[in-house]
Amino acid sequence: MLSSLLLLTTIALAEGPKFSVLGEQEPTPFEGVLFDPEATAIIMSDREFASASCDLEIEFNLDKQATEYHLQLQNAQIRYVSLKEESDLMITQKDVEITTLQETLKKQSPYNKWLWFAGGTAAGGVITVALINTATKWIEASQ
């Protein structure tokens, strides 16, 4: 019923409103439907009620969507903060682990690095000379 009233009022408004107040037994100045004052009041108030109702429903739905949007935004921000904190914690743990491993490696490495390097080079040279002498003697013996 409400939609048909809205349709009638929009059709009537599209042609341009014609309204005339008549007394009993008076002829109408135009062709149309005649309503008594009570019916006219009902039609006018129904139109205002429908408009107000529509505005309230639109406002309600917009507020509802805004609330849902803010909730989603707040959830996304909370998730971002928690992931950032988790990432920072993991980086801190890895830094501590790297520092611990570096300290452990320093403790296990020999104190006299150059002495060990020189000794290894000398030992390698002596072994090489000994192998060359042995190989030469073996080749001379086999001839």
Image (tube, rainbow, N blue to C red):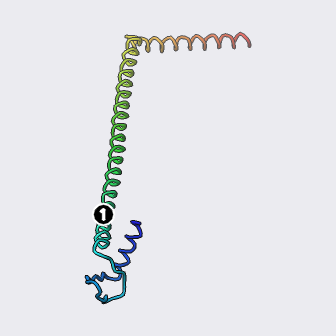
Residue at x 56%, y 11% (from the top left corner): 127
Q: Is residue 33 left or right of residue 120?
A: left
The one nearer the camera, 10 or 132, is 10
Helix, strand or loop at mark 1 = helix
Residue 48, x across and y down, in percent: 29, 66
Which quarter of the figure is the N terminus placed in?
Answer: bottom left
Residue at x 35%, y 79% (from the top left corner): 12
Residue 76, x across and y down, in percent: 36, 41
Residue 94, x across and y down, in percent: 39, 25
Locate residue 74: give its quadrant.
top left
Which residue corresponds to mark 1? Answer: 49
Residue 122, x across and y down, in percent: 48, 12
The one nearer the camera, 6 or 133, is 6
- The 10 Å Cα crowd at callout 1, few under 14, some 14 to 19, many 20 or more, is few
Q: Is residue 34 above or below residue 46?
A: below
Q: Is residue 69 above or below residue 55?
A: above
Count the marks: how many?
A: 1
User: Given the current orientation, which residue lies at the most extreme front position?
Assistant: 25
Which quarter of the figure is the C terminus placed in?
Answer: top right
Residue at x 36%, y 40% (from the top left corner): 75
Q: Is residue 19 above or below residue 98?
A: below
Report the amino acid beneath label 1.
Phe
Q: Is residue 3 left or right of residue 136?
A: left
The one nearer the camera, 104 or 37, is 37
Locate residue 33: give its quadrant.
bottom left
